[in-house]
Amino acid sequence: MTPQGTRQGPGLATERTAPPTRRFASVVRAGSRVTPERARSHNRVLVLQELYRSEGLSRADLARAVGLTRVTISDLVADLIEDGLVIELGLRADARPGKPATLLDINRKGFAVVALDLSYDNLFRGVVTDLDGTVLHREHVEVVDVTGTDAVEAVAALLDRLVAAAQAPVLGVGVGSPGIVDDAGTVLSAPNLGWADVPLQGALAERTGLPVLVANDANAAALAERTFGGAQEDAILVRVGRGVGAGLIVGGRLVRGAHSAAGELGHVVVGTDGGEVCACGKTGCLETWLAIPRLQARLEAAEDADTRRAALAAAGERLGISLAPVVGALNLGEVVLSGPLDLLGGDLLESTAETIRSRTMADSHGGPAVRMTTLGRDIVVLGAAVMVLTGQLGVF
Amino acid sequence: MTPQGTRQGPGLATERTAPPTRRFASVVRAGSRVTPERARSHNRVLVLQELYRSEGLSRADLARAVGLTRVTISDLVADLIEDGLVIELGLRADARPGKPATLLDINRKGFAVVALDLSYDNLFRGVVTDLDGTVLHREHVEVVDVTGTDAVEAVAALLDRLVAAAQAPVLGVGVGSPGIVDDAGTVLSAPNLGWADVPLQGALAERTGLPVLVANDANAAALAERTFGGAQEDAILVRVGRGVGAGLIVGGRLVRGAHSAAGELGHVVVGTDGGEVCACGKTGCLETWLAIPRLQARLEAAEDADTRRAALAAAGERLGISLAPVVGALNLGEVVLSGPLDLLGGDLLESTAETIRSRTMADSHGGPAVRMTTLGRDIVVLGAAVMVLTGQLGVF
DNA sequence: GTTTGATTGTTAGTAACCTTTACTAACGAA
DNA sequence: TTCGTTAGTAAAGGTTACTAACAATCAAAC
C-alpha cells in the first residue's frame, strides 16, 4: 500500500491514497428480499405489462415474450382473470397450423382511473379514464381566490363528483399539482394555492378510501410524454405557462431530485447579460424571458410581424441557453415543449432547437430532437393516470 | 370522450384529446422474469451487501437486517462460504445472554480487483486492490505519442503486469478511459488516444480471460465519489484537467445518457458574452474557461496575487454558470470537484458555489453542497474497482 | 380423404426455494 | 440449579416454476 503516492505525470494530482471510509452507499434498496410470493407478483406484473403493450396475445405468446413457460403463464393468467384484470377475447382468427390460440387482453374497460390537474389558473380540471388513458368523462371547477384548506376542499369535492361519475370500479386517483411535491404526496410548497406542507395525498386517500398519488404537474406531464407521447428514455419536458417548469426522464425513470424539487427551471438565471427583475427577486430568471404573460405583453407591444418573430426567437434562445448545459450533462435525446401551441410551436421552438445545437457538442446524432408535445392540454391528467397505472398495476 | 375540448381558462391550451397511441414505453426491462434461482441469487447479493457494509455480523444479525429467516440466511451463508466469498471470524466477544454469535465477514483479502486509469496525459496508471478498495499495488507506463492499437497494446501489457502482481484471485478488471464509452465497453471516441469504436472491453476480456468493465473516467470517478466519498443520491462530479468532464449520479444511479455521452460538459458554451475560441470550433466552451492548461497560462500572465485570485474566481463563476441549470433541473444536492487541489480548492471552488447559489432558486436547504473530492488522484481507479464489485458481486 | 407436422393449452410430477415449527447449544441472571 | 434469552440447525410444509407428456385442433402435404 502506498500511503502517499508520489506525484507522477502532469495529470490530476490532489493527494491521499484513500483509506476508504467504512460508510458505503448501496444501490439495492434495503429490505428488498425476494420471497417466492414477491417473485410471483413480479411475474404477474410482467404479464400485465406485456398484455398492456399489445392487446390480443395468447398464453403461448406471453410465454415467449416474458420468458416463462406456457404452464406458468397459464397459471398466472388464471389468477389475473380471477381478479378481473384480464379477459379472454376469443379464438384467434387468422389461419395457421396448430390449435387456435385464445386471445387475452387487459380488462381495459373494466376499471376506471380518476385524474386531476390543479395547474390551471383559477380552475381545477379532472377526468375519468379507462386503463388506456382514454378520457371518458370531464369535470372542472372554478377556484378564484380559493386557497389553503378551501382549495383542498375544492379538490376533494371535484374528486367526489368524478368518482361518482365513474362507470367502473376506480383503480386509483392521480393528481398533478403545481409546486413542489414530495414522495409521500405532500405539497411542500405551492404559492399560488397558498399551500405549504399540505399532505394532499393522505387527505384525499382518507376521504375517498381510494389509492391516491400526488405529484408535481410538470413531472406528471413528463410521465405522460414518456408513456403516451413516445418520448425517449432520456428526455426533458418543459411546461411553459404562467410559470416555467420541467419534468426529466433519465434512463426511462422520472427524476425526483434531492429535495423533490427536480424540474424547477423557472428561476434559474439565464445568460450573463442581465434581464428583467423576477418576482423571486433575482434578475434574468428563465421565467422573465419565457413565461406566457410576459411573452404576450412583449408581443402586444411589438409593432410589426418581424418584431414579434424576433421576440419569440429571443425567448426560444433563452430557453435553449438554459437547456444546453442540461442536455449536454445528461446527454438527453429529446426536448419536448408543452404550452400554448401558437406561441411556442413556431419561431420559439426553432430558436430553442438551434440554440441548443449551437451550444452543445454536436454529437454524431446531430443533437436532441426538439418538438412540441402531441398530448395537448390533457398532458397532466394523462400523466396522473400513468401514475395510478404504474402504482396499482405496475404497468409501464 | 370530448374530441376537441373547449378551451377553458387561460392556462395551457394546445388542443387534442389524446387518443393514446398504442406504443408504450416500459419501465421494467424485458426478460426480467424471476425464477426461483434468480430470486436466490438476488438474496445472496443482499447478504453480501449487508456484510460488505458492516463487517462482523452474525447470521442472526443478517436475518434481521435482510428480512429473511435465520434458516434461510444460514443456507445462503453456507453457499457463500463454500464459494470462498464469506469467512467466519470467530465468536462474538461482548458479554450478553444467549449463545454467542459466530461473526462473519466478506473475504476481503481473498480476492483482488485490478483497476486502470487511462485519463492521464501520456501515462496509464493501474492498481491492484482488495475488496475494500484498499490499494495494494501500483503500476504505471509512459505512453508518449502512443495511439490506436499501440495504445490498446500498452493497456493490455500494463494489465498483464497487474494481474501477475495480484496476490489473490482476480475478481475482475475495471477501466476508466477518457472519451465516450458505451454500455458494452466500446470506446466510441477518444481523440487523445486516437480511438474510435475500439472494443476495449472485449479485447481485454479475451486477452486476459477475466471479466472486464470499461467506462468513462469521469463516470467512474462519480461512482467512486458516491461509494467511497459519501456523495449523495443526487450529485455531480466535475473533473477538471486537460479537459472538463463530469459524471452524474441521479437517484443513486449513474447516468449514461441517450448516446452514452452523459457528463460531456466541456464543450457546452457558457454565458452570452463570447469568450475564447475552443479546439472544437465553438466560442466560449466551458473548457476554454476552466481547463488546467488555459487556467495556468492565465495565472502565469497575471501580475499580482489579486489578479490571480480574480482569474480563479472568474473560472469558478463560469463553472457555476454552466452548472446552475443542471443543479436546478435535477435538484442536485451536491457538487464535487476533482482535479488539482491548489488550483480548484480555493477561490475557484468558492466562486462556483456562490454562483450556483445566486443563480438557482434558493430552496429551503440553501442550495447544494459544493466541495472538493477527498479521494485524490485515485478517484478513477477506485471508481473502476467499484464497477467490478458491482458487476461481479452486486455489492453497492 | 388421410396423414403429417405444428401449435395451443392442460395435467402430472419434480426440483428449488423460503417458511414455520421445533430442537439443541450456550450463556447471564437469579 | 433454574429460568429466560439468543444462535444456529433440522425436519416438514407450502409455494413457485420447471420438465415431460398429452389432447385438441388446424394447415398442408400426400
Image (spheres, coloured by chain):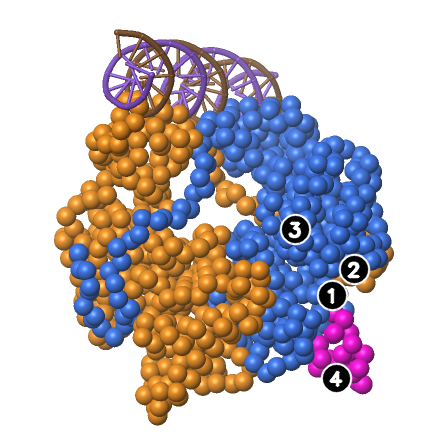
Chain colours: A blue, B orange, C purple, D brown
Question: Is there CB contact under 8 Å for labels 2 and 1?
Answer: yes
Looking at the rendered structure, the secondary structure element under dot 1 is loop
Q: Which mark is residue A242?
A: 1
Measured in 3D between alpha carbons, the distance from the residue under mark 4 to the one under mark 2, in whole angstroms, is: 29 Å
Where residue B59 sits, quadrant-wise, is top left
Q: Nearer the viewer, residue A396 or A222?
A: A222
- Among the two numbered marks 4 and 2 on one chain, the one whose residue lies closer to the N terminus: 2
Q: Is residue A361 magenta?
A: no
Magenta residue span: A292-312
Q: Where does the N terminus of chain A fall, quadrant-wise?
A: bottom left
| First of labels 2, 1 by sequence position | 2
Circle 3 chain: A
Q: Residue at x 27, y 61 (%)?
A: B378
Chain of the residue where label 2 is placed in the rendered structure: A
Residue B202 appears in which quarter of the rendering? bottom left
Element under disc 2: loop
Real-space CA distance between mark 4 and mark 3, rounded to the nearest whole angstrom: 44 Å
Mark 4 residue type: Thr
Looking at numbered disc 2 in the image, what kind of residue is underneath it?
Asp
- Give the letter of the chain under mark 4: A
Q: Secondary structure at mark 4?
A: helix
Earlier in the chain: of badge 2 and badge 3, it is: 2
Dot 4 corresponds to which residue?
Answer: A307
User: Which one is closest to the eye, mark 1 or mark 4?
Assistant: 1
Q: CA distance from mark 1 to mark 3?
A: 22 Å
Looking at the rendered image, the disc whose residue lies closer to the viewer, 1 or 3, is 3
Q: Amino acid at mark 1?
A: Arg
- The secondary structure that most of the magenta stretch takes on is helix
Q: What residue does disc 3 label?
A: A197
Of callouts 1 and 4, the N-terminal one: 1
Residue beneath disc 2: A121
